[in-house]
Image (spheres, helix red, strand yellow):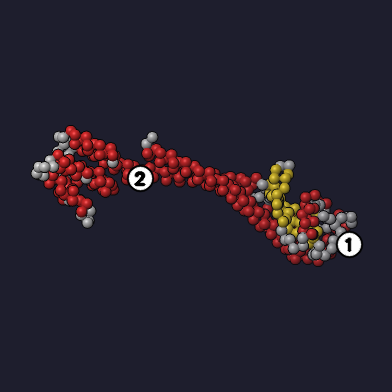
Amino acid sequence: MKLLLKFNLILIVLIVAGLLAVSRIAHSFLIDNAKAQVMQQAELMMESASAMRTYTTEEIKPLLVQNPQFDVTFLPQTVPAYAATVTFARLRQNFPEYTYKEATLNPTNLQDRADDWESDIVEYFRNNPDAKEFSGERATPTGTSLFLAHPLAAGISCMECHSVPSAAPTSMLKKYGSSNGFGWKLHEVIAAQIVSVPANIPIQIATKAFGTLMWTLTASFAAILLAVNLALYFVIIAPVRRLSRVTDQVSLGKVTLLKYRCAERTKLRNLRGLSIAFLLPFPRLYGCWINCRHESSERSPGISSFHPLIQFHSRPDRTIPEDYCNCSMPASQGHLQSALHGLLIYV
């Protein structure tokens, strides 16, 4: 198996492991973030309903109760809960997933009566006067639902109609009767504003964001892997292959160092030290071989042609001698060629 292939396999395994770790963490994080986003929108809708209640109590009701027709026909526009519910119903035209209800334990309009789970929320606020918000999840026939609830306490304006039946407007008693919606106490929690949304909404948001994130990361890692492969090939693999061909040809006597010109060394400038380390032993080995063979004779004059290379390591600036391009080595000796080839194998 080639080295580049092994390197790619290692990188791919690391990338896949990283993607799995990121996906595990990111999916949970995105779902939590989507739920927080949905609950934030529910909070805005809740505040919008509360603002409408205040506006109705302070601005609309004082005007409508002065109308003589109010004593004959009850006007629901004077009721804050009615104004908030109608406003939210129109808001649902753009946000159909969200629902709003003012769940009341003892309502005048029986449509506002709290269900069992809504009654538990009202009782929670009654038992925890300092609690201003309550949220959670609940199971429904259509799936899990998220909800956000705020307490509603009876104010002074509420007591005008809901304290005792005798204090209520006549038109109100004619429409709703005197059996429900009375006996409220001032500042007592009598209802809860509840905004609900299906849990699949944040899951859909998180799934979409998760898919975009994973595709982006996968494409980025693939681009990085391709860039690393190209860099390895052109910076390391290609020069090493060229150097391998040169050393192989020199060791077999097919070319001499004279043919290894400066232009070829320029191609190997990124591996300059390695190319010198590969080629420098050839003349030195040849000189040692001549000295051993002619130990008792005069030093071979051909060795002097390799002196610039032999003196390379003694140079403080580690520069290539000017005579390096003119150096050559006889390639006729078969046993020397075998020795040099063995050197290459060793290196």
Mark 1, residues whose alpha carbon is within 10 Å: few (<14), some, or many (≥20)?
Answer: some
Q: Disc 2 residue type?
A: Ala
Which SS class for mark 2? helix
Give the amino acid at mark 1.
Answer: Val
What residue is rendered at 58% in x and 47% in y?
27
N-terminal of the pair, mark 2 or mark 1, is: 1
The front one of 124 and 232 is 232
Quadrant location, the N terminus: top left
Residue indicated by mark 2: 231
Mark 1 lies on residue: 164
* Residue found farthest to the top: 334
Q: Nearer the viewer, residue 108 or 198?
A: 198
Of the two numbered discs 2 and 1 in the rendering, the one whose residue sits closer to the viewer: 2
Image height of 312 relative to 9, above or below = below
Left or right: residue 202 compared with residue 131: left
Residue 305 figure quarter: top left
Counting from the top left corner in percent of width and height, residue 165 is at: 89, 60
Residue 270's spot in the image, x, y percent? 28, 48
Answer yes or no: is residue 91 visible.
yes
